[in-house]
């Protein structure tokens, strides 16, 4: 994903150059109207002048050249989707503006008037709305949640948009504003028939508690690309989730400030944004706008309470917080010996030397640091080694069953001397990149000595991806831990462990999951005794639209197009079977939509014995472009 940001920066540089060129042309035009001939400044002071001084706006040599070189011309044409031959994207941009305006009108149902939504519909035809299912069935209920599903075939046709949307929102309380989100993710243009697939989410207070409605809609539009209007809306899927009010309005409460605000490091460092620090810390210290920084949780001082170690941006110290008995945290960084200022992305709090206390392993840019704990939360560096790539995450297991914890490091960006990139430095090929940084397995030999056994145990096979995360699990129930690796820009790895020797079986097991892999979690979601696997990827609205258009990679094979389409689909749930294989049940279980999903975990949120899923998603905090 860092490479994605680099590409964006390069494209913005090209666009900036084009804008400057446009500014120069405008300046020339203005100058030619007001001052056709640049004036020579007169010497009124009596001082000698060695050369003439020109006044007015001057055009730099070459800026009056109207013909762009091929790369710039290509980049300029791609700014406009119509010029670039992508009418579907031009339509999507126009239609999205209408849909977002509609979503804003839903925020306060009380303000919906008799003509509120009329402006969004074609007045030359009778609108048709089928969005209110008459049959809504309960599919799950416990003391915390009520889940209901609507029968989309039970919707009556309503020709008044205002009445239809008012009925759609009628179960929400009128005393509070609603939260709405809408996303257009598929487009079909077939002559005058233009349709789009849309996801709509509405949440707010209801009489039973906090409710969220998730639905998929099929919208039909007039064929105007720049100014489309709606003709009909039909429900494709409808689901309600209600947090029952007897248990409180929310399942979780944010108590970060209450447990951390007593620390200067929290108030002066953590609460300040990346943009704040970018204006104060040199970038060569490792400050990165895409902050791939993790944390580790574990008891470092033996008091039975979990503590937190936080990896920060380069130029800011990593932080160690010790938990007090009342649940608050106190900054223990200065006496921890682990206040590294270099760019650190990942850490583990684990017992490396089997002495009963938790030690610390840190992924620091292109290095791995192993720090020994004295039992009080103070650490000393006992082992360090270079990695073959910029480490993005760490995982631990005893892969060879010798009683010592071993470390696996996921590499993302390769070192400069190993890098092989495309024209703009992107992974190649984009959907199945094989020019990433290699991962590393370090075997614990005891006495704070580690050996790189990556090649020796077979983990060098397919070890050229952009790896984000790894997860260990004995999926084949043979007594040793196997390894799944989630890779960005392409297919993942499943290394089967056979007595300490690994083989990549992801292809034959059907779990390569060619996408933008960013995390993996094992769990038995259906309680059949066989481990299942959930992988976080990216749901891309733009990708779902573009990859299904006829003009997308016209010379590519159908297999390659399917791979690109899969890349944009979203998260994946693989169900383990008694035959030792996996089945992709993502669509049936409706778990693909995780947005830009950085991390996910199986966890029993409501203590009912069934594992649920939680997904952390999002990107840079700014205005929503509609693609995240």
Image: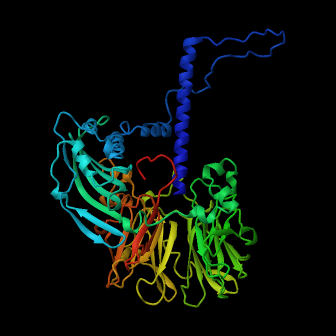
- The foreground one among 253 and 18 is 253
In x, y percent, where is residue 142? Answer: 33, 73
How many numbered circles are shown? Answer: 0
Outermost right residue: 47
Identify the residue at horizontal 55%, vertical 30% (top origin): 21
**Toward the viewer: 123 or 513?**
123
What percent of the width, then of the height, locates residue 441?
58, 77
Is 163 situated above or below 504?
above
Question: Picture quarter containing residue 149?
Answer: bottom left
* Residue positioned 42% across, 65% down in the render: 248
Residue 555 seen by the camera = no
Is residue 23 at all visible to an observer of this figure?
A: yes
Q: Is residue 18 above or below residue 253?
A: above
Q: Nearer the viewer, residue 11 or 624?
A: 624
Q: Determine the image quadrant of residue 312.
A: bottom right
Where residue 120 appears, as percent x and y from the top left, is 28, 38
| Display coloring | rainbow
Image quadrant assignment for residue 38: top right
> How far across and how far down the image is residue 88, in percent?
31, 43
């Amino acid at each position: 994903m860092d490479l994605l940001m680099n590409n964006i920066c390069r494209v913005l540089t090209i666009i900036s150059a084009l804008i400057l060129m446009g500014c120069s042309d405008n300046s020339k035009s203005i100058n030619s109207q007001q001052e056709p001939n640049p004036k020579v400044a007169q010497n009124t002071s009596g001082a000698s002048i060695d050369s003439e001084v020109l006044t007015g706006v001057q055009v730099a040599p070459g800026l009056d050249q109207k013909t762009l070189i091929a790369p710039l011309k290509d980049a300029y044409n791609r700014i406009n989707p119509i010029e670039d031959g992508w009418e579907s994207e031009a339509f999507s941009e126009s239609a999205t503006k209408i849909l977002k305006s509609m979503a804003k009108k839903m925020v306060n149902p009380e303000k919906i008037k008799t003509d509120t939504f009329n402006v969004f519909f074609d007045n030359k035809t009778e609108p048709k709305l089928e969005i209110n299912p008459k049959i809504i069935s309960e599919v799950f209920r416990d003391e915390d949640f009520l889940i209901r599903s609507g029968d989309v075939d039970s919707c009556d046709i309503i020709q008044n948009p205002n009445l239809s949307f008012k009925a759609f929102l009628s179960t929400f309380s009128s005393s509070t504003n609603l939260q709405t989100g809408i996303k257009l993710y598929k487009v079909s243009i077939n002559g005058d028939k233009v349709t789009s697939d849309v996801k709509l989410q509405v949440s707010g207070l209801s009489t039973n508690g906090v409710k969220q409605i998730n639905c998929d809609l099929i919208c039909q539009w007039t064929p105007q690309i720049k100014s489309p209007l709606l003709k009909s809306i039909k429900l494709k899927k409808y689901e309600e989730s209600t947090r029952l009010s007897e248990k409180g309005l929310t399942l979780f409460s944010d108590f970060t400030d209450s447990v951390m605000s007593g620390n200067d490091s929290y108030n002066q460092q953590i609460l300040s944004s990346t943009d704040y620090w970018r204006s104060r810390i040199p970038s060569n210290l490792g400050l990165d706008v895409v902050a791939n920084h993790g944390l580790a949780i574990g008891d470092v001082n033996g008091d039975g309470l979990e503590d937190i170690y936080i990896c920060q941006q380069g130029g800011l110290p990593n932080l160690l917080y010790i938990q007090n008995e009342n649940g608050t945290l106190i900054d223990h960084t200065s006496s921890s010996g682990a206040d590294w200022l270099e760019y650190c992305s990942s850490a583990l709090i684990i017992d490396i030397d089997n002495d009963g206390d938790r030690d610390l392993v840190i992924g620091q840019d292109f290095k791995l640091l192993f720090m020994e704990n004295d039992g009080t939360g103070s650490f000393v560096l006992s082992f360090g080694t270079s990695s073959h790539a910029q480490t993005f995450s760490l995982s631990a297991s005893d892969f060879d069953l010798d009683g010592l914890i071993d470390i696996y490091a996921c590499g993302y960006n390769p070192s400069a001397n190993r890098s092989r990139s495309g024209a703009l430095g992107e992974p190649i090929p984009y959907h199945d990149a094989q020019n990433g940084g290699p991962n590393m397995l370090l075997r614990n030999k005891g006495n704070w000595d580690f050996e790189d056994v990556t090649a020796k145990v077979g983990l060098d096979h397919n070890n050229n991806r952009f790896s984000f995360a790894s997860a260990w699990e004995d999926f084949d129930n043979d007594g040793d831990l196997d390894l799944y690796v989630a890779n960005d820009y392409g297919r993942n790895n499943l290394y089967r462990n056979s007595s300490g020797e690994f083989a990549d079986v992801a292809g034959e097991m059907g779990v390569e999951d060619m996408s933008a892999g960013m995390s993996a979690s094992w769990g038995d979601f259906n309680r059949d005794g066989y481990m299942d696997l959930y992988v976080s990827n990216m749901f891309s609205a733009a990708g779902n639209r573009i990859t299904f258009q006829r003009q997308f990679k016209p010379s590519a094979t159908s297999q390659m197009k399917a791979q690109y389409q899969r890349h944009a689909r979203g998260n994946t749930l693989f169900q383990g079977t008694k035959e030792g294989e996996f089945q992709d049940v993502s669509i049936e279980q409706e778990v693909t939509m995780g947005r830009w999903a950085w991390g996910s975990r199986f966890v029993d949120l409501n203590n009912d014995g069934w594992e649920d899923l939680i997904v952390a998603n999002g990107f840079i905090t700014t205005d929503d472009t509609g693609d995240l």
